Image (cartoon, helix red, strand yellow):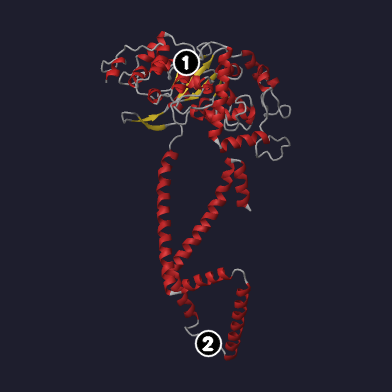
Amino acid sequence: VYAMAAYFFSHKMVRLILLTGPIASALGGIFTGRIVAWAIRQVWGEDAGEAADGAEDGGVVTTTPSSSKKSKKGAAAAAAASKKDRKASSFAGFDAFTDGVKTFSSSRDGKIVKKILAVLLLGVLLMACTQFKDYSWAISASLSNPTIILKGQLKSGEVVYVDDYREAYWWLRDNTPEDARVMAWWDYGYQITGISNRTTIADGNTWNHEHIALLGKILTGEVNESYEIARHLADYVLVWGGGGGDDLAKSPHLARIANSVYRDHCPDDPTCRAFGMARQGQPSPMMSQSFLFKLHSHNIRPGVTADPAKFQEVHRSKYGKVRIYKLLGVSEESKRWVADPKNRQCDVPGSWFCPGQYPPALKDVLSRKKDFAQLEDFNRAEKDDEYQKKYFENLNNPEKAKKAAAQAAAEKSSASSQQTSTPTAPKPSQAEIDAVYSKWDDTEETTEMWKLISSNNIAELEAWLGREPIMAYLRSSDGRGPMWWAFESRNQDIVRLLMKHGVPHQDRDKNGKTPVELLDS
């Protein structure tokens, strides 16, 4: 019963798989124990058991004549009845098979086969146990280390300790007012509270799904719209960067959570496929304009900057794992309203349990939310079957969902381009162009640019340059860039596209060659 109940509820909510752990371990142990016991009995116990049975009776079996005759008659009758039943049974073939297996297993050859099988099973179990022991010791080392201090390796091979997270939390503690409110994804809430001693917008004990969805909406929403929400809730924003499992890697999941409550976040797209990285490793249009992307990639990706009138970067950790921004133009009126004890809702007068409320300035945003009906909300009368159905359809067929999202984004972009003649992104300044053009480095962006040009993928290249025109000025470590690769591929269409963006074709690479000279090679 326990196993069936745990299995059922773990399918309703992934985190409830913890309930399955104890019973799965117990049943697995019983199953493994039965196998080991059977294998040991085949190898060592069977002959000894037979000898022991004979020893108990002194090696002699005695029966009285009458009891012997009765037993023979009874056995004959039972055998006859058994044969009759087998003939009448529709499972006669299966019965014959099982009888054959039993006969063979009790024969001399059968006992040898069982012993060989038992030895193989014991050997496999021994190897599995050895591997599990080694794995346990290996993983214990990582689990024993502090979770915010990591060991890493630089490109030079030097082993370093990455202390960025503790460093950033201490910076918050030492350099921000005691009443400062820090906005970050809920994963880091406890660390901010415990180490920095600062108020965080959400943490691991935030059970309110709608509140987490609002946080996800801010982080993955359009930067200006999200800023107008954030300035009423927080004073600082903390972002995890540096690659790996950073905030940008998690952000598609954040967008899906936001859309589960704010359905206009990714319209008609429950899995929010419009938000994420494109196939060539570049952000989708929705991601490239998001609050999180701007703060995460500020002054790291060419052409990506956070508005200096709204955000001030006040701390960047040693290895860039954590970035902290101060929100400019914070609404002091909303901050005072939230801090006023009269605006808290206590369960009873004088209680310590007094949840706060959102400031009135967010009334319009909150009016657009739809409370999320989770599958495990068994007692909830209101259902959201249509959303759940479409959500799981998109999960089961991600390619179809991705194509639909891309088509919707293209239609939206086409409609907006018909309404306005302004470019999708502002033209970079000469200072920005010089900064990118003078930096020769092999990066993910240069690799993707080379792939697009060499494969003549003009559509994706044009879309990318429309979002980030500065990318036309990338150069790799050999001094070559898009214009060199376009001439090398003899692709006149891409050459014209790059010239349209103002990329020169007379500059020289590391070996002193211009793009035009590559036509002769």
Q: Is residue 187 left or right of residue 142?
A: right
Across and down, in percent, residue 233 comes to: 60, 20
Residue type for callout 1: Thr
Query: Residue 487 or 312: which is nearer the viewer?
Result: 487
The numbered mark at residue 62 is: 2
Picture disc at residue 94? none
Question: Is the residue 383 above or below the residue 288 in the image?
Answer: below
Residue 305: give its label.
1
Rendered location of residue 475, percent (x, y): 35, 18
Instruction: Determine the residue located farthest toward the bottom in the rendered image.
Output: 65
Displayed quadrant of residue 474: top left
Q: CA distance from mark 1 to mark 2?
A: 99 Å
- Residue 52 position in % (x across, y down): 47, 76
Q: Nearer the viewer, mark 1 or mark 2?
A: 1
Q: Residues within 10 Å of mark 2 (few under 14, many from 20)?
A: few
- Residue at 45% x, 64% y is 39
Residue at point 63%, 49% (across, down) = 5
Q: Earlier in the sequence, mark 1 or mark 2?
A: 2
Check contact, mark 1 vs mark 2: CB within 8 A.
no
Tell me if mark 1 has few (under 14), some (14-19) or many (20+) residues whose alpha carbon lies within 10 angstroms of its own: some
Identify residue type, mark 2. Answer: Thr
Tag 2, which secondary structure? Answer: loop
Judge from the rendering whether residue 377 lies leftward or rightward of residue 288; answer left or right: right
Towards the viewer: 180 or 409: 409
